[in-house]
Amino acid sequence: QLPLVESGGGLVQPGGSLRLSCSASGFSLDNYAISWFRRAPGKERQGVSCISSGDGKTHYTDSVKGRFIISRDHAKNSVFLQMDSLKAEDTGVYYCAMIPCLAGWDTTVYDSWGQGTQVTVSS
């Protein structure tokens, strides 16, 4: 049983939308920052977005700014990633992780990745 579970991926056409979910079972995410990473085919895992645990400040990698929105729902004990205006280059496996939104968060060395959820953007 993994601590975090990703869901919501699928196949969409360019310009389409998907909403990814990151949920925890057996513990609360309230006091944890959550980051989204993705691994495109043949490439290294890269940071996409992060939401802080305290003030809820959000962070995004340049390539998704204006298109993706990260949010938290305490009642559902989940973090979401709304992805709009999807492009082919957004294709990859998306993972969430308990990584703080500090400077350089997108390069954090992490060893507790889950199974991820597949996002495919294609015509």
Image (cartoon, rainbow, N blue to C red):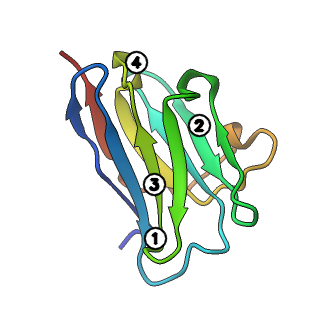
Task: Point out the tag, 2 or 1, that comes first from the N-terminus.
Answer: 1
Task: Point out the tag, 3 or 1, that comes first from the N-terminus.
Answer: 1
**Dot 1 corresponds to which residue?**
3
Q: Which residue lies furthest to the bottom in this view?
A: 26
Residue 7 drawn at (x, y percent): 31, 54
Asked if 13 appears above or below 75 in the picture, the reply is: above
**Dot 2 corresponds to which residue?**
47
**Dot 3 corresponds to which residue?**
80
Q: Residue 89 carries which label?
A: 4
Give the total number of marks visible in the rendering. Answer: 4
* In front: label 2 or label 3: 3
Q: How far apart are marks 4 and 1 (CA)?
A: 28 Å
* In front: label 4 or label 1: 4
Q: Mark 4–mark 3 contact, CB under 8 Å?
A: no
Please indicate whether residue 21 sits to the left or right of residue 28 in the image: left
Q: Distance between the residues labelled 2 and 3?
A: 15 Å
Q: What residue type is labelled 2?
A: Gly
Q: Can residue 101 be seen in this view?
A: yes
Q: Which amino acid does label 4 sit on?
A: Glu
Q: Residue at x 32, y 40 (%)?
A: 18
- Number of residues whose C-alpha sits closer than 10 Å to that of mark 3, classed few (under 14), some (14–19) or many (20 or more): many
Task: Point out the tag, 4 or 1, that comes first from the N-terminus.
Answer: 1
Q: Of helix, strand and loop, which one carries label 1?
A: loop
Q: Mark 3–mark 1 contact, CB under 8 Å?
A: no
Asked if 77 appears above or below 39 in the picture, the reply is: below
Q: Which amino acid does label 3 sit on?
A: Phe
- Number of residues whose C-alpha sits closer than 10 Å to that of mark 4, classed few (under 14), some (14–19) or many (20 or more): few
